[in-house]
Image: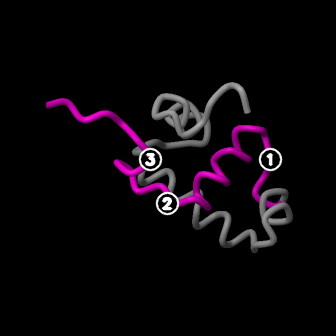
Amino acid sequence: MYKTASTTDHHISRREKEILELLSYGYSSPEIATSLYISRHTVNDHRKALLTKLSVKNVAQMIRKGFELQLLNASN
């Protein structure tokens, strides 16, 4: 049986998904921190976790993988 990719396959948290969405809109880490009322350090920790969990090397690849895994959608 084939396993489909989903949020749970990569254990992406709700907060990591929020950060991924804001990155896809072009927000910077300081802008995300302000928007979510968290520190830039926390944003960067989530970004690093996303890079690892999604097995990518940069934000562009992270966003592309987010669309591939349907963590993001074009209608947002």
Please state which of residues 48 and 13 is positioned toward the viewer in this rendering.
13
In the rendered view, tell whether residue 59 sits above or below residue 68.
below
Q: Which amino acid type is shown beneath numbered disc 3?
A: Thr
* Residue range corresponding to the magenta coloring: 1-30
Residue 70's x, y, as percent? 51, 33
**Foreground disc of the pair 3, 1:** 3
Residue at mark 3 to residue at mark 1: CA–CA distance: 22 Å
Residue at mark 2 to residue at mark 1: CA–CA distance: 18 Å
The residue located at (58%, 57%) in the rendering is: 16
Name the residue at the front extreme: 1
**Foreground disc of the pair 3, 2:** 3
Crowdedness of circle 3 by 10 Å Cα count: few (<14), some, many (20+)?
some
In the rendered view, tell whether residue 70 sits above or below residue 18.
above
Q: Which residue is mark 3?
A: 7
In the rendered view, tell whether residue 71 sits above or below residue 64.
below
Name the residue at the left extreme: 1
Please state which of residues 11 and 65 is positioned toward the viewer in this rendering.
11
Left-right relation of 47 to 52? right
Q: Is residue 9 magenta?
A: yes
Badge number at residue 13: none
Crowdedness of circle 2 by 10 Å Cα count: few (<14), some, many (20+)?
some
Q: Which amino acid type is shown beneath numbered disc 1?
A: Tyr
The residue located at (67%, 54%) in the rendering is: 19
Image quadrant where one finds the N terminus: top left
Circle 1 sits in a helix, a strand or a loop, which is it?
Answer: loop
Badge number at residue 49: 2
Of the image marks 3 and 1, the number of the one nearer the N terminus: 3
Describe the colour scheme in one phrase. Answer: one colour
Q: Which residue is mark 1?
A: 27
Of the image marks 2 and 1, the number of the one nearer the N terminus: 1
Q: Which amino acid type is shown beneath numbered disc 2?
A: Ala
